[in-house]
Image (cartoon, helix red, strand yellow):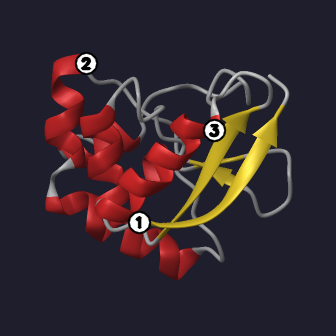
Amino acid sequence: MAPLLCIERSPGLADILRGSHGLAEALRPTPESNLYVLPAGQAKPEEIGGLLTKPMLDTLLGSLRQKFDGVFLDAPAIGLYPDDTAAIARSVGDALVVVRMHKTRRDVVVRTLRLLRSWGATPAGLVLTGR
């Protein structure tokens, strides 16, 4: 998301969970009124799973929920990084599932919804994209 919004990737979520930066340093305003972005931050691939299972993630999400009307996390595809997605799903209440039109098979969507429920997230809806 950071490149799409032309903001720096770090500091971000990984840096906060690691304890090297605070939320105030990492949270970025966007040109849209009342829309802020917390970029991913810098982390080695082998480090991400450990960061996402830290209790600090739940604390951080609680702080964000108090500050904002809605909090959205951009998570990896379940098929690519199931452990990372599971860690995130355990910390959120609801999940929006992005489905690529004419690419994502129905059985994959059904499996994704089942996995989210098993991890404690409630599928709140599907977003259909053409890309």
Q: Amino acid at mark 1?
A: Ala
Question: Which residue does the numbered mark 1 point to in the structure image?
Answer: 121
Task: Determine whether 83 is above or below 38 in the image.
Answer: above
For image coordinates 44% across by 29% down, the residue present is 10
Q: Quadrant of residue 111?
A: top left
**Nearer to me, 108 or 7:** 108
Give the residue drawn at x 42%, y 56%.
Answer: 114
Q: Quadrant of residue 96?
A: bottom right
Q: Earlier in the sequence, mark 2 or mark 3?
A: 2
Using the numbered discs, state the Cα–Cα distance from disc 3 to disc 1 in whole angstroms.
20 Å
Residue labelled with disc 2 = 45
Quarter of the N terminus within the rendering: top right
Q: Which residue is mark 3?
A: 106
Q: Which amino acid is tagged 3?
A: Arg
Element type where label 2 sits in the image: helix
Q: Quadrant of the C terminus?
A: top right
Image check: 70 left or right of 52?
A: right
The residue positioned 68% from the left and 38% from the top of the image is 99
